Image (cartoon, rainbow, N blue to C red):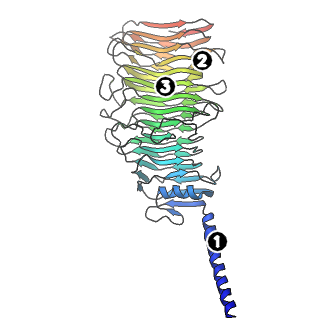
Amino acid sequence: MNTHYKISKSTQFLKQKLLLMFLCLAGVANAQLSGSYTINSASATSGTNFNNWYDLAASLTTNGVKGAVTVTVQTDITSASQPVFGAISGASSTNTITIDGGSKVYTYTGTYEAINFYGADYVTIKNATIRNSNTATYSGLIRFSNASNYNKIDNCILEFSALASATSQTYYVAFSNSNTSVTSATSVTNGNNCTISNNTMRTTATNAAGPYYGIVCMGNTSSYTSTGDNNNVTNNKIQNFYYYGILNYYTNGNQFTDNDISRDNATSSSPISTSPYGIYSVYTYGTNRSTIIRGTNIHDLPYKSASASSTTNYIAYWYGIYAYYNYGNTTYPFVVDKNTQKNIMTYYYAYCHYMLYNYVVDLTSNTVDNLISYSSGYSTYPFYLQYGSDYNIVGNTVQNCYFGQAGTGYGYTFYCYYIYNTYRSWNLFEDNVIQNNWAGYYFYGAQIYYYASWKINRNKILNNNTGTNYTKKPRISVLLLFVLPVQFGIQL
């Protein structure tokens, strides 16, 4: 009896222990997140609270989700531990993860980027101030890699608080596989169908140069010609940068709309590259939607109220929208539309639209206003188009510009060289306005060269002058050289 009793008691204890272990294991196995959580540094990571951003990212990556997750940030956080959002099991278009920053400040003091998306999908970060306090090379705010898809950064402040001097490989947002070579590309997609919207990207240090890049969108080298990235970059304010405002390379279907690019945070003591780019778009395709650059306002460079004659922290050579080998098609053309470049001061020359080897292009309703190139003897091109095919050049305006303000500059407003027809019956040059401009020596309204069929209608070239007194009888040419048919109409 006693022996049987002891065995029975032992068996009962073992069963209870196994049951407890099972329940514990079951609890771990079902620890996927779902529902509402907080980030609050005043409390430990436990239950529905996370002490910091790092703990949240680790939990999502380790445990996954089983329903929609909302996280509210309740306190400011300062940390050197980088939150890495890896692949999150269970995440989907319904099981989304939304992190509401609640206008709180997350200050990152570690190396590389403040937030790392490494394969996470369906994550939204909104209403947060994300700050990097570093000054080192490779510092960034947010980087996407390893196929981080369907994510959104919305209505955030992304800022560098200490970055003063020019530092390579620094950025606000990057789609890039490398944290040390942000413009390198591999065969792996960094992210698609993501949205970067309504954010302010800025520097707060005195006389800051700005990061080397504003926004970097690197695609991949294996499928960019056929598979859409389809990322959206819309309504952001880039208020300081050193070299590139936006860089778009090896991508498909990315769209950049209604962004504001300036150096509002800069002063006359803020360093800048002597040959900066507003937007740089190279090797793009449009498989199921167009690559679009639309509604960009690029203005007040190198800083507000700058003089073109200055040689201190100045722009020597300006490339406003640099487009090289962008492939559109008749369904999804490469679109450059409704962009403005205003109050751009350069010492030598400028290419406001530098477009080479682009195919099936809608270049429409863009404005260049108060561009000034200073030095004598140099040529400036508001629209420099060379090679490529099938352009609709419609409704663009160049006005109030000075080419060679020091005395003998050349202005080539529309320079179109070897623009063929392949997929469209005609190239269009219509409803463009060239008015109230001045060149130190010669001013050319439009030069269109060689081997294409053009319709040229309803264009206006009005009140443009040359000579050192700004009112001298103009040396103005509209030079048109054609081989194939032309429909022609112009107002002088």
Q: CA distance from mark 1 to mark 3?
A: 62 Å
Q: Position of residue 127 (x, y in %)?
A: 49, 50
Q: Residue at x 49, y 22 (%)?
A: 353
- Classify mark 2: helix, strand or loop: strand
Q: Height in image: 354 above or below 409?
A: below
Q: Residue at x 53, y 24 (%)?
A: 324
Q: CA distance from mark 1 to mark 2?
A: 68 Å
Residue in the foreground of this view, choosing between 250 and 361 = 250
Q: Position of residue 286 (x, y in %)?
A: 62, 30
Q: Height in image: 267 above or below 429?
A: below
Q: Position of residue 18 (x, y in %)?
A: 64, 75
Q: What residue type is disc 1 on?
A: Phe
Tell me the number on the disc at residue 389.
Answer: 2
Which quadrant: the N terminus?
bottom right
N-terminal-most mark, 1 or 2: 1
CB-based contact (under 8 Å), mark 2 and mark 3: no
Say which residue label 1 marks. 22
Q: CA distance from mark 2 to mark 3?
A: 17 Å
Residue in the foreground of this view, choosing between 136 and 417 = 136
Q: What residue type is disc 3 on?
A: Tyr
Q: Determine the residue located farthest toward the front in the rendered image.
A: 3
**Horizontally, is 120 left or right of 381 in the view?**
right
Q: Is residue 395 visible?
A: no
Say which residue label 3 marks. 322
Q: What residue type is disc 2 on?
A: Ser
Residue in the foreground of this view, choosing between 39 and 224 = 224
Please tell me how crowded label 3 is: few (under 14), some (14-19), or many (20+) other residues with Cα within 10 Å. Answer: many
Quarter of the image for residue 32 reads: bottom right
Q: Is residue 94 visible?
A: yes
